């Protein structure tokens, strides 16, 4: 089941007061986001390897840092883009003896401070992956080959104090080419021979339409650029967003910070109303927020714009089970406008 949100509940304004008040100026211009550059002399050859799985780096167009994931005949180089500022770059290489089965999975990637250790299935078999340094590179690399009977379900990154910084489920990337959603699309005519593919577990889990277009829209918004400027952040799988009549609106991009941040500025806001016959209402608010670790940014893909920024998302639990809750104060500017086109009344939920 792909991640999906129906237009049934107010997300962004739930943390706001009810009054309509004036707000201060939007703040300084948003700085541009820039892709991380490769070192002048990238390490030659794999930085980390295990049983045929390996990870290396090279320079791409404009000197961008590119991560090269390889295992058993599959190889792909992914260059970091302007919005790739996570302290972990994770790729999976999956393969099998035929196109209807998955027999092995390699977990490869890079990690940098504040990530101090990465672990597969910490609540089950708990396999800690060695982080290998390389001269001239501020990242460390990891590589692990797993089989059909010990393939991991979770990948978790921690800092030196044991604080959980990020986790991602890996099972969305298991399926072989003939079984993309556990349905056999090849029937009696599968392609011959073995297969192997490099996969991105965040993209595999995303349920939003046009995920790369959505990211470009999100990180072109000045409030988002001000929020992430000079900071590391993870991107979680994108969520789809639908009207109650089943039509697609767009989706949400979830931004996760390793540590809590603060924000003071003008943001777009959106809400839905049970008695309305439109998809949603949108406008602007001045936000003062602290202890922010998770931010949801909502995109109307047809309008090609950010229509809401939710600073009050619940961040992932740390290793000791604590959850950091954001403190958000919103002053709505003017009236919210109907947007997204006509819709039907959403069913009531308990």
Image (cartoon, helix red, strand yellow):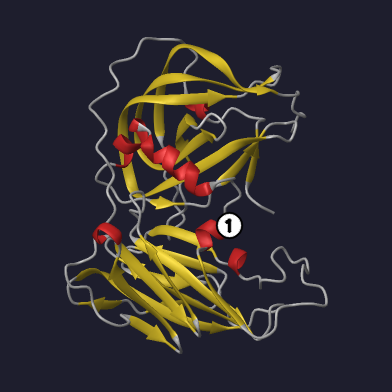
- The image shows residue 31, relative to residue 208, as above or below, that is above
- The image shows residue 341, relative to residue 7, as above or below, that is above
Could you classify mark 1 by the number of other residues whose Cα lies within 10 Å: few (under 14), some (14-19), or many (20 or more)? many
In the foreground, 201 or 166: 201
In the foreground, 194 or 265: 194
- Can residue 32 be seen here? The reply is yes
- Residue 133: where, in percent of width, then height? 25, 77
Where's the C terminus, which quadrant?
top right
- Residue 323: where, in percent of width, then height? 45, 48
284 to the left or right of 190: left
- Can residue 314 be seen here? The reply is no
16 to the left or right of 111: right
346 to the left or right of 294: right
- Residue 314: where, in percent of width, then height? 48, 43
* Residue identifier under label 1: 205
Q: Residue at x 43, y 19 (%)?
A: 284
- The image shows residue 207, relative to residue 194, as above or below, that is above
- The image shows residue 102, relative to residue 63, as above or below, that is below
Q: Residue at x 59, y 67 (%)?
A: 173
Q: Residue at x 49, y 42 (%)?
A: 214
Q: Residue furthest bottom?
A: 51
In the foreground, 41 or 172: 41
In the foreground, 27 or 30: 30
Where's the N terminus, which quadrant?
bottom right
SS at mark 1 in the image: helix
227 to the left or right of 218: left
Q: How many circles with numbers are drawn on the protein?
A: 1
- Residue 87: where, in percent of width, then height? 33, 59
């Amino acid at each position: 089941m792909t991640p999906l949100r129906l237009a049934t509940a107010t997300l962004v304004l739930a943390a706001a007061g009810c009054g309509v008040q004036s707000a201060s100026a939007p703040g300084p211009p948003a700085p541009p986001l820039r892709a991380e550059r490769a070192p002048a002399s990238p390490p030659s050859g794999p930085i980390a390897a295990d049983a045929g799985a390996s990870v290396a780096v090279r320079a791409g167009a404009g000197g961008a840092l590119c991560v090269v994931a390889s295992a058993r005949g599959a190889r792909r180089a992914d260059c970091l883009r302007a919005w790739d500022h996570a302290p972990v770059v994770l790729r999976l290489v999956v393969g099998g003896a035929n196109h209807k089965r998955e027999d092995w999975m390699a977990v490869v990637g890079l990690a940098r401070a504040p990530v101090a250790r990465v672990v597969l299935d910490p609540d089950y078999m708990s396999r800690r992956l060695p982080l290998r340094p390389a001269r001239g590179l501020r990242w460390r690399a990891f590589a692990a080959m797993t089989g059909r009977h010990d393939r991991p379900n979770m990948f978790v990154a921690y800092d030196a104090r044991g604080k959980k910084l990020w986790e991602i489920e890996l099972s969305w990337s298991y399926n072989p080419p003939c079984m993309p959603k556990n349905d056999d699309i090849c029937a009696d005519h599968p392609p011959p021979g073995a297969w192997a593919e490099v996969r991105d577990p965040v993209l595999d889990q995303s349920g939003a339409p046009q995920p790369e277009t959505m990211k470009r829209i999100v990180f072109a918004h000045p409030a988002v650029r001000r929020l992430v400027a000079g900071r590391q952040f993870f991107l979680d799988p994108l969520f789809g967003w639908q009207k109650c009549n089943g039509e697609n609106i767009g989706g949400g991009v979830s931004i996760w910070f390793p540590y809590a941040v603060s924000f003071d500025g003008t943001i777009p806001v959106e809400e839905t109303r049970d008695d309305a016959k439109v998809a949603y209402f949108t406008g602007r608010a001045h936000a003062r927020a602290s202890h922010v670790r998770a931010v949801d940014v909502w995109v109307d893909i047809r309008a090609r714009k950010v229509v809401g920024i939710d600073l009050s998302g619940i961040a992932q639990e740390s290793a000791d089970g604590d959850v950091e809750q954001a403190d958000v104060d919103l002053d709505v500017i003017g009236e919210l406008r109907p947007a997204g086109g006509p819709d039907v009344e959403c069913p009531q939920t308990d």
